[in-house]
Image (cartoon, grey):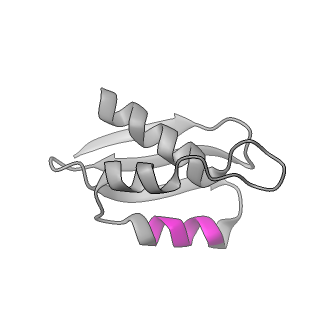
């Protein structure tokens, strides 16, 4: 299991924490800051799922008038983790 921490940009959440297993499935996803209930829900929906699939699904999602969102930042975090 590999652990990752990602500092978010342009969102209410400040940080994203997650792990990837040997098959690049997401585990233990949590957000620091942001909309607590919604982000806990995202964590549950992502648990055990393929990281690339989740990144592709969430990439480009916006929040209000912002050019990004917590899910979009998660997609960026996952892509960065997969590139390493």
Residue 57 in the magenta stretch? The answer is no
Instruction: Give the image quarter of residue 49.
Output: bottom left
**For the point 59% across and 47% down, which residue is it?**
60
Please state the horizontal and vertical placement of residue 46, each as a whole percent of the image. 40, 64
Estimate the x, y position of residue 52 in percent, counting from the top left. 33, 48
Query: Which residue sits at x=32%, y=55%?
Result: 26
User: In the picture provided, is 5 more to the left or to the right than 40?
Assistant: left
Q: In this view, does 14 lie to the left or right of 72?
A: right
Estimate the x, y position of residue 1 in percent, counting from the top left.
Answer: 21, 46
Residue occupying the point 58% across, 43% down: 73
What are the residue bounds of the magenta stretch? 38-44
- Residue at 71% across / 56% down in the picture? 34
Residue 9, x across and y down, in percent = 68, 35
Q: Is residue 48 left or right of residue 39?
A: left
Please indicate whether residue 78 sits to the left or right of residue 64 in the image: left
Residue furthest to the top: 84
Q: In the picture, which quadrant includes the C terminus?
A: top left
Q: Main secondary structure of the magenta part?
A: helix
Residue that protrudes farthest toward the left in the picture = 22
Q: In which quarter of the image is residue 63?
A: bottom right
Q: In this view, does 55 lie above or below 41?
A: above
């Amino acid at each position: 299991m590999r652990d990752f921490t990602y500092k978010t940009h342009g969102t209410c959440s400040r940080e994203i924490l997650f792990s990837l297993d040997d098959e690049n499935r997401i585990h233990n996803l949590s957000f620091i800051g942001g909309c607590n209930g919604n982000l806990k829900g995202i964590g549950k929906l992502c648990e055990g799922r393929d990281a690339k699939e989740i990144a592709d699904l969430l990439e480009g999602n916006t929040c209000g008038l912002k050019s990004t969102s917590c899910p979009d930042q998660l997609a960026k975090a996952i892509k960065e983790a997969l590139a390493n």
